[in-house]
Image: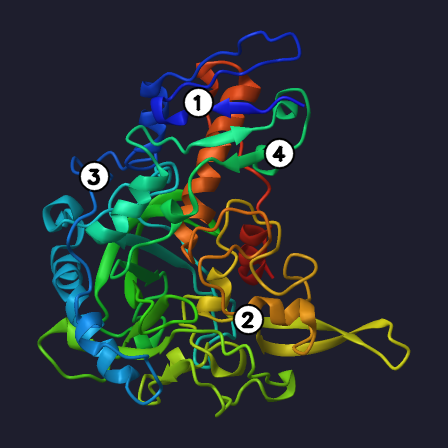
């Protein structure tokens, strides 16, 4: 079988059919327009200023990043994690302060931070957010409503350098496409090979990524959100399918850093800050307190699902701030591993597949099941989701039992390796592969299967998305 080489760096696809006939090329201007689209086409008529994407990624490696890791100069532990987390928050504070204070006037370009490409059709036109993890009614003890979420991810210049290594100046990704794609019905993501050296998809030491997470339930419906920073977005809610203005509360900020010296097993430190209404301060940033940090999956620490509500004291790669507000600790992950209230680590009214005495599958029901963590969920970040994002055999309708190889493979410590063999690793970054890469492949699929430019004016044909289906089931029940 012939191998079809696609040079996306110059935005041209030379496609060969069985008769060696050329397929239409994709002009650079069409690719670029879709890759760096600012926001959804659904915009309010009473506004003039809208969100502007910053995708002018550095093409030379910048000498910036989280420099404190050199001063820290040791492996992070439960004992010293608090001081490390404080320094990481300090690094991100200039960005966070301006974002909170300037709201819809905020400009990422002015502060020198960046966004991932290919998400324009999903972004709201005011803040650039897109749908995040929702939480079903009952996730939080004092909330008797579904809670929908929205997120915005930003990259410092060093992290953006890696985004630009993967997506070129036109938004293309170098790859090889199997010629059978053009004659068959298999999805494109199953027939591509990323044509980049492994290191291009690995973030550089000191790179920092920040995620802002917002709740569609505000202080009038959820007391823990009282006086939280309010933002206005223009989007759809699940049970209000028409676009409209919505106030959302900033309630979680994740700050993650590539630091292989401090986190030698994975190369990453994930930290989460949550809104605490009880903090008295004129500086709103003081009201975002650390929930904790995670720098590994503790693969040797196994916790029975019957005791999931109790943090396993044997954890050595998670630190939790027990003074963080109660609502934020309700959604900790498996065995008490770090997971924030936006992160979806807790499944409600679900089941676990177990083996009975005859080694046949049976099902055990759980009203509440923490079954993943921040780092575990990011582990399958690769070119194709050959495995579901969560430890489940059927798209989150049930979960593997805690002591099975199928479950424990989600709690390995990987560094520079893909979750599934033969895949291209995107180094724990879910926004770049799960969001941007999927949208890019949807664009290619639409262009080539539609065979004309007009199809790009309609919604792009996206690949089947089991994880989005799982997330929405949590609030559709």
Q: CA distance from mark 2 to mark 1?
A: 40 Å
| Sequence-first disc among 3 and 2 | 3
Measured as percent of width and height from the top left, residue 23 is found at 53, 12
Query: Marks 3 and 1: which is nearer the front?
Result: 1
Figure quadrant of the C terminus: bottom right
| Sequence-first disc among 1 and 4 | 4
Q: Which mark is residue 411?
A: 2
Please name the residue that numbered disc 1 is placed on: 456
Q: CA distance from mark 3 to mark 2?
A: 41 Å
Say if residue 41 shows up in the picture.
no
Seen at 56% across and 81% down, the residue is 300
The single residue placed furthest to the right in the displayed view is 358
Q: Is residue 249 left or right of residue 267?
A: left
Q: Which mark is residue 222?
A: none
Q: CA distance from mark 1 to mark 4?
A: 18 Å
Q: Sort mark 4 into few (<14), some (14-19) or many (20+) by Cα contacts within 10 Å.
A: some
Measured as percent of width and height from the top left, residue 149 is found at 40, 59
Q: Indicate the secondary structure of the residue bearing disc 4.
A: loop
Q: Is residue 100 left or right of residue 416?
A: left
Q: Which mark is residue 187?
A: 4
Please name the residue that numbered disc 3 is placed on: 50
Seen at 58% across and 51% down, the residue is 469
Q: Indicate the secondary structure of the residue bearing disc 3.
A: loop
């Amino acid at each position: 079988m012939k191998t079809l080489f696609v040079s996306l760096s110059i935005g041209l696809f030379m496609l060969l059919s069985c008769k060696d006939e050329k397929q239409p090329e994709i002009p650079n201007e069409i690719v670029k327009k879709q890759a760096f689209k600012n926001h959804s086409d659904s915009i309010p008529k009473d506004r003039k200023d809208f969100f502007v994407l910053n995708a002018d990624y550095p093409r030379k490696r910048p000498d910036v990043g989280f420099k404190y890791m050199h001063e820290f100069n040791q492996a992070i532990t439960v004992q010293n994690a608090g001081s490390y987390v404080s320094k990481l928050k300090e690094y991100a504070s200039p960005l966070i302060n301006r974002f909170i204070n300037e709201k819809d006037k905020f400009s990422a370009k002015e502060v020198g931070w960046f966004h991932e490409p290919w998400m324009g059709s999903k972004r709201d036109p005011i803040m650039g957010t897109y749908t995040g993890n929702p939480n079903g009614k009952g996730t939080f003890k004092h909330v008797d409503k579904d809670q929908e979420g929205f997120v915005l991810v930003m990259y410092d210049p060093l992290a953006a350098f890696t985004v630009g290594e993967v997506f070129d100046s036109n938004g293309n990704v170098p790859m090889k496409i199997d010629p059978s794609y053009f004659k068959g019905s298999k999805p494109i993501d199953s027939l591509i090979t990323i044509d980049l050296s492994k290191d291009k998809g690995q973030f550089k030491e000191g790179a920092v990524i920040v995620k802002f997470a917002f709740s569609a339930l505000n202080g009038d419906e959820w007391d823990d959100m009282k006086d939280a920073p309010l933002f206005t977005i223009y989007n759809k809610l699940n049970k209000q399918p028409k676009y409209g203005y919505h106030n959302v509360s900033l309630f979680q900020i994740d700050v993650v850093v590539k630091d292989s010296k401090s986190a030698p097993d994975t190369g990453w430190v994930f930290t989460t800050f949550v809104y605490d209404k009880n903090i008295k301060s004129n500086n709103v940033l003081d009201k975002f307190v650390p929930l904790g940090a995670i720098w590994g999956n503790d693969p040797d620490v196994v916790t029975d699902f019957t005791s999931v509500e109790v943090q396993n004291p044997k954890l050595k790669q998670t630190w939790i701030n027990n003074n963080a507000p109660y609502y934020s600790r309700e959604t900790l992950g498996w065995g008490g591993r770090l997971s924030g209230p936006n992160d979806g680590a807790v499944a409600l009214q679900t089941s676990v597949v177990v083996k009975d005495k005859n080694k046949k599958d049976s099902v055990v029901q759980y009203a509440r099941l923490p079954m993943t963590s921040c780092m575990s969920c990011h582990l399958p970040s690769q070119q194709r989701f050959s495995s579901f994002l969560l430890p489940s055999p059927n798209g989150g309708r049930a979960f593997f039992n805690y002591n099975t190889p199928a479950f424990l493979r989600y709690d390995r410590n990987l560094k520079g390796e893909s979750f599934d063999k033969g895949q291209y690793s995107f180094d724990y970054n879910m926004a770049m592969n799960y969001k941007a890469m999927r949208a890019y492949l949807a664009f290619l699929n639409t262009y080539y299967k539609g065979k004309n430019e007009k199809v790009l004016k309609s919604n792009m044909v996206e690949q089947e998305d089991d994880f989005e289906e799982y997330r929405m089931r949590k609030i559709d029940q």
